[in-house]
Amino acid sequence: MAQPCSLLVALSVASFLRPLVYAQYDFESDFNSSSSMLRKRNDKKTSTPMYLALSKEQQGDIRSVDPLKENQEVNRKLQSSTCSGNNMMCGCNDVRQSDYRGRFHVTQSGFQCREWSMAGSYPNQGLDDGPYCRNPNGVASRTWCFVENADVLWDYCNVPMCSTDSSSSSGTSAITSGCINTARYDAIYADIEAIKNSIGNDVDRSHFLGGIVRLVAHDFMDYDATNKNKPFGQDGCLVFDSPMNVGFTNIWCDSCPLKQLYDAKYSDLSRADFWVAAGNAVIYLTSVNNELDLRNTYYWGRATADSCPGSDSRLPTTAGCQSVEGVFLERMGLTWKDAVALLGAHTLGRGNFKFSGHHGTWVPNDKEAQVFDKKYFEELFGRAWSPRAVGTTHQDWTTGSPNSSRPKMMLNTDMCLLFDIDTQKKCCSRTSMFKPNGQSRCESYENVECPMYSRDNPRIEAVKAVMNFLGGSAPNSNNAPFYKAFSIAWFKATTNGLDDLKPLADTC
Ligand code: HEM
């Protein structure tokens, strides 16, 4: 058995050897002589060799460069450029993107870039700022980098071209993801799990998890299929300072863990793609036995919009089912079943009086508010909910002690999925429920039971969906009907109006 100290020596030798391979590598001579852009790192045989042969056209890209002339051109461009800068996710075309100093760090095949300091091939080129896509001396036709892979040495990056036209030169207005392969997708799951596990208390953890899912929802709920000029939808864009989007101040902000994760590791992806993947991660991590994995219906290729004025006015209010119909059925083109399934996400997280004014969890406590299951429907169906005033003009619904420090709540938009609260606004959902001391659980609404919808009311479809998601006669632990309907609805909502998305695959 290896002694601990010899193991340590072996490990440090191994980690020393890896950069050495790069230090000895002469990239430019490889460019000028090689007939394959991606070469095997060494002669070792692998079962799936990853040669990507150079096409004739690509070989034409490789040229002998005049580094001096090239650098002058790059410097000129850097000084006057509208398409360079540390945070840029695009590069200029006419200098082969050799001015690119942004943070793209994943190649066209989905490999992570390695630090340039390991290559040693391009000293004094300002490449020591991280493992990013670059094109030193304009040696290649566009940016590239050495990669983190056992078989492949280097690969091109797909850094988008910025426009050099100053009218559209922000470079961040429409960003699409370079490549999201299964490895990157899995990495997002792992990173979200690590942040989740680092949060010490249930309230903050449930808000972190719920906040991510709500972020995705607010992005897709502004879609309008009937507005061809401004459809909005899943574009990574919200009007954050709108009253409709309160509560995201500690989910998506410069010091928020989710945004910090994005900035540090995933800024080469569009925000829209990243948000959906992060939402999927939350749903997977919080579903019972990790049963709901939405990866099979994850598609990527959404563009991020830098601004989306007016999108907030399309978001649903909490007033009632007219709002649900307007957003989900009329503008998003979903069915009642889809809408009800999506609202089942209220099983996660909470409302906060500081944000929306609606305070409490939809499920019995903050622990359960971290589990993505059918509990929301059980609570909606099974408890005695009665109206609660929110300020002087609004109301929601609560159950249990009205003075609880951990209140439970339903919004009008939740209650209306099962009860006709348009016909009867002040009522209790279960007047036949009593506390052990004989008092009604309906508090002052003990005599007015909330009516159900009549059979000919179109909203009866919502009732049927709620009953279906209960999974059979109580008690049961059958989440399958809810999970199935949710994955269909989530897929529709997160891809609405986007025709050219790509499926998740091992390579891009
Ligand atoms: C009629 C549509 C909807 C209305 C009126 C609505 C309303 C609300 C309100 C008022 C809050 C509390 C916000 C706060 O005070 O922080 C909230 C939270 C939440 N919403 Fe919705 N929502 C709707 C649809 C959705 C959809 C479609 C999803 C997901 C698929 C969703 C997921 C969530 C989650 C997970 C939370 C908890 C957030 C947290 O813990 O920070 N909502 N919603």
Image (cartoon, rainbow, N blue to C red):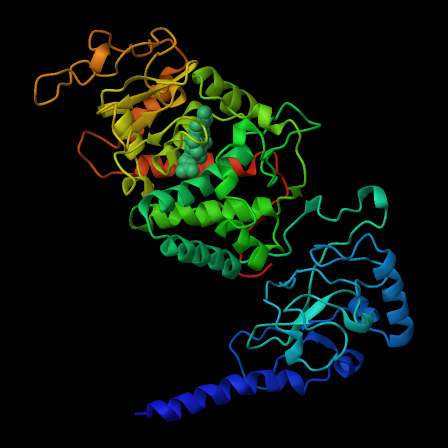
- Residue reaching furthest left? 437
Q: Position of residue 7 (x, y in %)?
A: 39, 89
Answer above or below: position of 25 versus 401. below
Q: Is residue 319 left or right of residue 76?
A: left
Work out whether 493 lies above or below 25: above
Q: Is residue 78 left or right of residue 196?
A: right
Image quadrant containing the C terminus: bottom right
Whether 399 is drawn above or below 209: the answer is above
> In this view of the protein, which residue sits in the foreground, 44 or 301?
301
Q: Quadrant of residue 143?
A: bottom right
- Outermost residue on the right side: it is 69
Residue at coordinates 30% horizontally, 12% vertically from top-left? 452
Residue 25 in picture, x, y percent from top left: 69, 85
The total number of labels drawn is 0
Ligand 1's quadrant: top left
Residue at image x 81%, y 73%? 137
State the residue in front, 109 or 85.
85
User: Image quarter for residue 223?
Assistant: top right
Residue 496 makes an appearance in the image:
yes
Q: Is residue 180 visible?
A: no
Q: Is residue 344 left or right of residue 476?
A: right
Q: Position of residue 326 (x, y in %)?
A: 52, 19
Query: Which of the two residues, 138 or 108, is positioned nearer the viewer here?
Result: 138
Displayed quadrant of residue 158: bottom right
Q: Which quarter of the figure is the N terminus placed in? A: bottom left
Q: Is residue 488 above or below residue 93?
A: above
Residue 150 image point, x, y percent: 55, 77
